[in-house]
Image (spheres, rainbow, N blue to C red):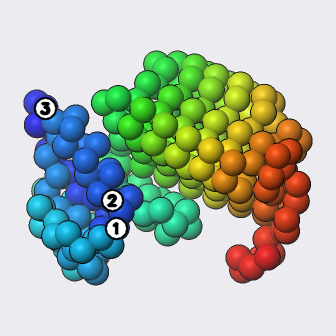
Amino acid sequence: MGAGDPGWVVLGAGGHARSVVDVLERAGHAVVAVSGADPTGDHGEPWHVDVLADDREAFELISARGLRAVVAIGANPARTGLVHELVARGLSVPPVVAATATVSARSVLGAGTVVLEHAHVGPSTRLGEAVIVNTGAVVEHDCRVGAGSHVAPGAVLLGGAAVGGGALVGSGARILPRVTVGSGATIGAGAVVTGHVADGQTVVGVPAVTRGTRRPGGTL
C-alpha cells in the first residue's frame, strides 16, 4: 500500500466488484472490505477480504476509519446514487485508474469514476461522476461522458463524441467523431453510431438504427 493510502472499501460484491478489487490490488492498494448480500459474489468463489452485510455498514466503516470508497456496481442508477450519497457525506470517492490504463493528464475524471485494465482516456476529455470505462475501451480526445454512464469493454468513442448521463455504450460499439448520444440511451453491442441518438433511445446495428425509446420508468 502506498504511503498515505488509508485503504479502500468497495461497495458491491458481484463480478464488476471483482474486477475493481483486482485493479486496486494490482496497483498496490489495500482493499479492506466489500459490501454485498452474497459473500461469494456472483461466481461462487469466496472473497479474500471482509464482506459487509450492506452498504449502510460500509458507509459507517468508511467514515469511522477515514477509508476511500469506490462503487463497483454495474447498474447505472444504483452506482450513480451511491456515489452521489458518498460525495454528499463528504467521504473520499476518488477516481480509480488501472495500472495498465492510459489516462491523459489533460483529461478530467469525476468522483467515483473507474477506468479498467488497458482502457484509454484521451486529452481534453471529461468524464462525469460514477462513469465506467471498462476493459479495453477507448474514449478519445475531446469527448464528454455524462455522470453514471458505462462505456463497456472494447467500445470506442472517437474524437469529440459526447455521451449523456446514464447511458450504456455496449461492448465493441463505435461512436463516430462529434456524434452525440443522449442521456439514458443504449447503444447495442457492436453498433456503429453515425448520427445523433436522442435521450432514451436504443440503437443497434451497422450503421446503427433505432430499436426503441426508453419511457419514464425504464421501459421501452
Dot label at residue 17: 2
- Residues under numbered marks 1 and 2 in contact, where contact means CB atoms less than 8 Å apart: yes
Dot label at residue 24: none
Mark 1 residue crowding within 10 angstroms, few (<14) / some (14–19) / many (20+): many
Tell me the element at label 3: loop
Q: Residue at x 16, y 36 (%)?
A: 28
Query: Residue 162 in the image: x percent, y percent?
Result: 73, 38
Dot label at residue 2: 3
Q: Which residue is mark 1?
A: 14
Q: Nearer the viewer, mark 3 or mark 1?
A: 1
Q: Is 83 on the left-hand or right-hand side of 18?
A: right
Separation of marks 3 and 2 at Cα, in angstroms: 21 Å
Q: Which quadrant: the C terminus?
A: bottom right
Would you identify the image quadrant in which residue 180 lies? Answer: top right
Q: Residue at x 28, y 43 (%)?
A: 23
Between discs 3 and 2, the one toward the N terminus: 3
- When the figure is inspected, residue 212 is found, relative to residue 72, above or below; the finding is below
Tell me the element at label 1: loop
The amino acid type of the residue labelled 3 equals Gly
Separation of marks 1 and 2 at Cα, in angstroms: 5 Å
